[in-house]
Amino acid sequence: MKFIDEVFITVQSGDGGRGCVSFRREKFVPRGGPDGGDGGKGGDVILQSTSHRRTLYPFRFRRHFKAKNGAPGQGKNKTGKTADNLIIEIPPGTLVSEAETNDLLKDFTQPGQSFLAAEGGRGGQGNARFKTSTNRAPRYAQPGEPGQFFKLKLELKLLADVGIIGLPNAGKSTLISVISSATPKIADYPFTTLNPILGVVQPDQQESFVVADIPGLIEGAHQGAGLGIRFLRHIERTRILVHLIDAASIDPQNPLAGYETINGELAQYNPLLMEKPQIIVLNKMDIPGSEQIAEIFQAAVKDRQVFLISAAARKGLAALKLKLLEYLGNHIPRQPE
Ligand SMILES: Nc1nc2c(ncn2[C@@H]2O[C@H](COP(=O)(O)OP(=O)(O)OP(=O)(O)O)[C@@H](O)[C@H]2O)c(=O)[nH]1
Ligand SMILES: [Mg+2]
């Protein structure tokens, strides 16, 4: 299943019901006055963020949303029924913009927020409202006000807690496949992963958290090289970054080259990304010779903590997960790997 992070929908609020033209008819009142009631208000279309929606996937099946029209007014001054509002549930983290102009209308930052996307038309006034001293029997009433129609773009930035970043082929997809529920494609060539992939990590007796495998970045990504930066926006809202490095690809003469390339791209895209906690992880530690490389790398980054793992051999993962939990503010159990 392709991860959908952008959908277009249409919303249409209900028309107001038309006002009624009617005259009282009662015994012994031969020429009753006007008693046509007002039309009911059309239904609003309201977007509402809720924590039980996590993706925009349901919008693949339904893209057009129309609220009902208000009922027409009736005789005996009866107002038409107001139509129910149509509520569209969306995941927190969704940005709503006008499809054509791209103007941002609403940023749903948390659950429980709502936005009036299209307001239902007012009901038309019935003829009872138009009675005056000079016109005691008005034969007209207002039509209902029409509803509104908009095309909207919904965009969801991944609400992942942890983003795994790194050069192509570092083993990002392998890592997410061994620590989470995700089952991405893994292969021995760069740019295997073309879209961000989400996985839920469920540690023992801990809050679960969401990890995102971000497609490989390369030098010049912020200017469009490789897959470009279109996925970097997904990591803007992650709380922690795991910077994954293929130990076997490290050049002992210039051990920080790849690491600095990635950080340079992050900084040029959005300097705030450099303020996120970043956990450095060397992968493929099962490959012979990687121990020495790791020592050289560690010396180069000085006192920054470096985690050594082998995603393929599932080594070093427990310590990494504990570190992630620590950053995410959970209680840390002490367990041997
Ligand atoms: N020896 C060894 N190979 C690994 C390890 N982890 C991943 N690989 C291999 O490295 C290659 C790339 O792995 P992926 O997980 O597809 O790498 P990626 O970072 O997702 O790559 P892109 O999606 O192209 O950016 C595959 O052939 C994996 O089998 C590891 O711990 N040890
Ligand atoms: Mg991949």
Image (cartoon, rainbow, N blue to C red):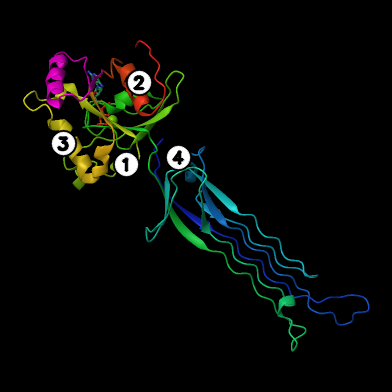
Check the picture and name the quadrant holding the C terminus.
top left
Check the picture and name the quadrant holding the N terminus.
top left
Packing grade of label 2 (10 A; few <14, some 14-19, many >=20) is some
Residue tagged 1: 236
- Dividing the picture into quadrants, the one containing residue 214 is top left
Instruction: Name the mark nearer the viewer: 4 or 2.
Output: 2
Compared to 302, does 47 lie above or below?
below
Residue tagged 4: 55
Compared to 19, does 189 lie above or below?
above
Element class at badge 1: loop
Precedes in sequence: disc 4 or disc 3 = 4
Residue tagged 2: 322
Instruction: Name the mark nearer the viewer: 4 or 1.
Output: 1
Q: Nearer the viewer, residue 24 or 8?
A: 24
Packing grade of label 1 (10 A; few <14, some 14-19, many >=20) is many
**In which of the image's four quarters is ligand 2 placed?**
top left
Residue 257 location (% of width, % of height):
12, 31
Precedes in sequence: disc 3 or disc 1 = 1
Label 2 CB sits under 8 Å from any ligand 1 atom? no
Which residues lie in the magenta part?
283-309
Left or right: 69 as drawn, with respect to 114: right
Residue 302 location (% of width, % of height):
15, 24
* Residues tagged 2 and 1 counted as in contact (Cβ below 8 A): no
> Which residue is at a point 38% across and 24% down the rendered structure image?
180
- Dividing the picture into quadrants, the one containing residue 311 is top left
Considering every residue shown, the one lying at the far top of the view is: 336
Instruction: Name the mark nearer the viewer: 4 or 3.
Output: 3
